[in-house]
Image (cartoon, rainbow, N blue to C red):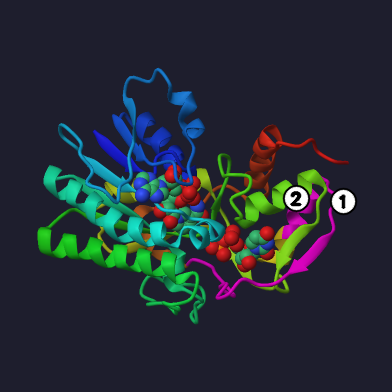
């Protein structure tokens, strides 16, 4: 049995699909705080899959043998974690402790979904895994960043002290089908606005940069990491870096939208630049992203088009 916490979320549900394809029996554990069971609807009737609605900040009881625990439960969009600060801190700390405890009790391999936010507003560019980051612990994003940094520390402690076979992936901005249209992250925000013909809201001057990875590439890197014998953090992301303004223009072009681009205030501590150095993933996992931004965006736009709650405005 393989356990995926956060299995009803965007990434968790794609990971469940991949694990089933690889022959695993999968138990998704999720309290549906930011996820949705609809992401798993297509698995109804699949005998190797089960869903357990449960808050992983409470003891996680699983009967029988467990080979892998993938710990993905956590609010992940800045809007979500600003609205759910305590839950975010609890799932990163207590939830990680419980998920590690489950892995230890069952002798399972453990993989933590960590984040590029561990680097905070980075002073080193691009970000390599040996950079310790520039995080404001008491700012509004601190609830997420520090929870994930604690989760990494806890994971390494279980590895060093209890000899659990652990892995840590630092996930950079990832996009694709099944993101919540209104989760506030930039991809659903811009695509939704462009498809509706509403103004596209750039935060700040739009000169901050991000690097976007398509979900199938990310899941492939994570699966490879789970099969490796490497224990230190590994960045998985796409190093193609764009300013947010360029990104908005790209989406406007691909959707054929007439939306205006407007400027809104920049959120506190919004990182100014972000781009993964993926040398480690290349060397250790033989992994690099394959999907071009334009192709990934087309697939994502198509998916959102089929899931928009209001008609497209011309
Ligand atoms: P998501 O919000 O779609 O999924 C998170 C899932 O965790 C949701 O289904 C939610 O209901 C569940 N959850 C939250 N608290 C829980 C709790 N206490 N008990 C049980 N379930 C709980 O977000 P996502 O984008 O799929 O992110 C998944 C993981 O990947 C998160 O840990 C996130 O920090 C990490 N990550 C994602 C990205 C990205 O770009 N998508 C980047 C960096 C890191
Ligand atoms: N952003 C934006 N408009 C939006 C949503 C986000 O300009 O409607 C910006 C945000 O300020 C950040 C970048 O897009 O600089 C990526 O934001 P996201 O919330 O997707 O994730 P982050 O990388 O900040 O965790």
Total labels: the figure holds 2
Callout 2: SS: helix
Q: Quadrant of residue 51?
A: top left
Which residue position holds label 1? 258
- Say which quadrant the C terminus sits in: top right
Determine whether, in the image, residue 107 is placed left or right of residue 99: left
The answer to whether residue 239 is visible is no
The residue shown at (26%, 58%) is 230
Q: Position of residue 141 (x, y in %)?
A: 49, 69
Q: Position of residue 192 (x, y in %)?
A: 71, 47
User: Where residue 23 is drawn, which disc sits there?
Assistant: none
Q: CA distance from mark 2 to mark 1?
A: 10 Å
Q: Quadrant of residue 166?
A: bottom left
Ligand 2 found in image quarter: bottom right
The residue shown at (48%, 46%) is 34
* Depth check, front residue: 152 or 249: 152
Is the CB of mark 2 within 8 Å of ligand 2? yes
* Depth check, front residue: 146 or 15: 146
Dot 2 or dot 1, earlier in sequence: 2
The residue shown at (48%, 25%) is 42
The answer to whether residue 305 is visible is yes
User: What is the magenta range?
Assistant: 248-276
Q: Is residue 180 above or below residue 125?
A: above
Which residue position holds label 2? 193
Determine whether, in the image, residue 25 is placed left or right of residue 298: left
Q: Position of residue 282 (x, y in %)?
A: 41, 58
- Is residue 273 found inside the magenta-colored segment of the image? yes
- Say which quadrant the N terminus sits in: top left
Callout 1: SS: loop
The residue shown at (15%, 31%) is 64
Crowd tier of the residue under label 2, counting other residues whose Cα lies within 10 Å: few below 14, some 14–19, many 20 or above: many
């Amino acid at each position: 049995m393989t356990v995926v916490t956060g299995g009803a979320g965007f990434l968790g549900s794609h990971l469940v699909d991949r694990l089933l394809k690889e022959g695993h029996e999968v138990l998704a554990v999720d309290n549906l705080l930011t996820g949705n069971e609809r992401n798993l609807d297509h698995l109804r009737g699949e005998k190797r899959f089960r869903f357990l609605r449960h808050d992983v900040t409470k003891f996680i009881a699983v009967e029988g043998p467990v080979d892998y625990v993938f710990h993905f439960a956590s609010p992940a969009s800045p809007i979500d974690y600003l609205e759910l600060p305590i839950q975010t801190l609890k799932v990163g700390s207590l939830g990680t402790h419980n998920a590690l405890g489950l892995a230890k009790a069952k002798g399972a391999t453990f993989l933590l979904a960590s984040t590029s936010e561990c680097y905070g507003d980075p002073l080193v560019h691009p970000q390599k895994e040996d950079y310790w980051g520039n995080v404001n612990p008491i700012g509004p994003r601190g609830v997420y960043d520090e929870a994930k940094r604690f989760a990494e520390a806890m994971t390494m402690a279980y590895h060093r002290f209890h000899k659990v076979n652990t892995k840590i992936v630092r996930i950079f901005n990832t996009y694709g089908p099944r993101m919540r249209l209104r989760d506030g992250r930039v991809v659903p925000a811009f695509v939704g606005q462009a498809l509706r013909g509403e103004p596209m809201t750039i935060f700040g001057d739009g000169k901050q940069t991000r690097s976007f990875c398509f979900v199938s590439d990310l899941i492939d890197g994570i699966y490879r990491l789970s099969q490796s014998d490497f224990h230190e953090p590994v960045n998985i992301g796409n190093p193609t870096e764009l300013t947010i303004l360029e990104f908005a223009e790209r989406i406007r072009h691909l959707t054929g939208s007439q939306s205006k681009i407007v400027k809104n205030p920049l959120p506190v501590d919004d990182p100014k630049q972000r781009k993964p150095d993926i040398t480690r993933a290349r060397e250790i996992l033989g992994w690099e992203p394959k999907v071009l931004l334009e192709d990934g965006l087309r697939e994502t736009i198509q998916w959102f088009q089929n899931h928009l709650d209001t008609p497209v405005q011309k």
